[in-house]
Image (cartoon, rainbow, N blue to C red):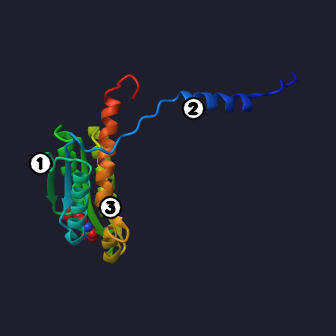
Amino acid sequence: LEAEPSHRPNDESRGCDRDRARVNVSEGHLSAFGLRVALVASRFNDLVTRRLLAGAEDALRRHGADLERCRTVWVPGAVELSLVAKTLAASGHYDAIVALGCVIRGATSHYDHVCAMVASGLNEAALETGVPVIFGVVTTETLEQALERAGSKAGNKGADAAVAALEMANLMKTLAAEPGRA
Ligand code: INI
């Protein structure tokens, strides 16, 4: 059989453009109005984590959050962030959780274990509860690099995490309001 001349690539690309024009786009806005956000911060390396927390609180306030409705919980170290984040997420009281920590590499492999535990634990907390749990954990080689990310030349990762929490909290509300389409 002789193959039919194929026009599929052109047809497909035209189809794609047509679909693109019809697609509805959802995104979370950045207002904190009416949102309740819980912040979980670890005491380990608190020279850095206090600055991340200050950055997160400042970002929430500047985006319209009522800080009276938000909450801060301190835990010993980054490893403990996940359990508390998951407990707060499962409580139903918060629209998003921001986990703030600082892990700095030392002479042993401890850093790798702490990073692996906190990354997978926070991700699991979000996936199991359906509540956004934002990874505001700075992982660096040196204290200097960590301080750079806690309110100096590389910005403030706590503030970035808080803004991500607002975007995700609002996006999840939008998706929940359209159950047929999520
Ligand atoms: N915890 C941190 O938050 N940052 C670190 O850099 C760190 N290091 O390197 O050891 C750290 N360890 C403690 C860990 O998070 C737990 O609190 C501890 O292991 C008890 O479970």
Residue drawn at x 32%, y 36% is: 172
Pick the quarter of the image with the N terminus: top right
Label 1 CA crowd tier, 10 Å (few <14, some 14–19, many 20+): few
Residue in view at x 22 percent, y 70 percent: 45
Residue extending furthest left?
A: 68
Task: Inspect the image, locate mark 2, and give the three-letter code of the amino acid beneath it.
Answer: Arg
- Can you tell which quarter of the image residue 32 is in? top left
Q: Residue drawn at (20%, 53%), measured in percent from left and top?
A: 39
- Is the residue indicated by label 2 positioned so its CB lies within 8 Å of ligand 1? no
Q: Between 87 and 162, which is closer to the camera in this rendering?
A: 162
Secondary structure, mark 3, is helix
x and y percent of residue 173 in the render? 30, 34
The dot on residue 20 is 2
> In which image quadrant can residue 100 be found?
bottom left
Task: Give the mark, 2 or 3, whose residue is nearer the N terminus.
Answer: 2
3D distance between C-alphas at marks 2 and 3? 34 Å
Which quadrant holds the C terminus?
Answer: top left
For badge 1, the amino acid type reads Glu
Q: Which residue is mark 1?
A: 68
**Amino acid type of the residue tagged 3 in the rendering:** Lys
Is 173 on the left or on the right of 71, as rendered? right
Q: CA distance from mark 3 to mark 1?
A: 22 Å
Q: Which residue is mark 3?
A: 157
Dividing the image into four equal quarters, which quarter contains ligand 1? bottom left
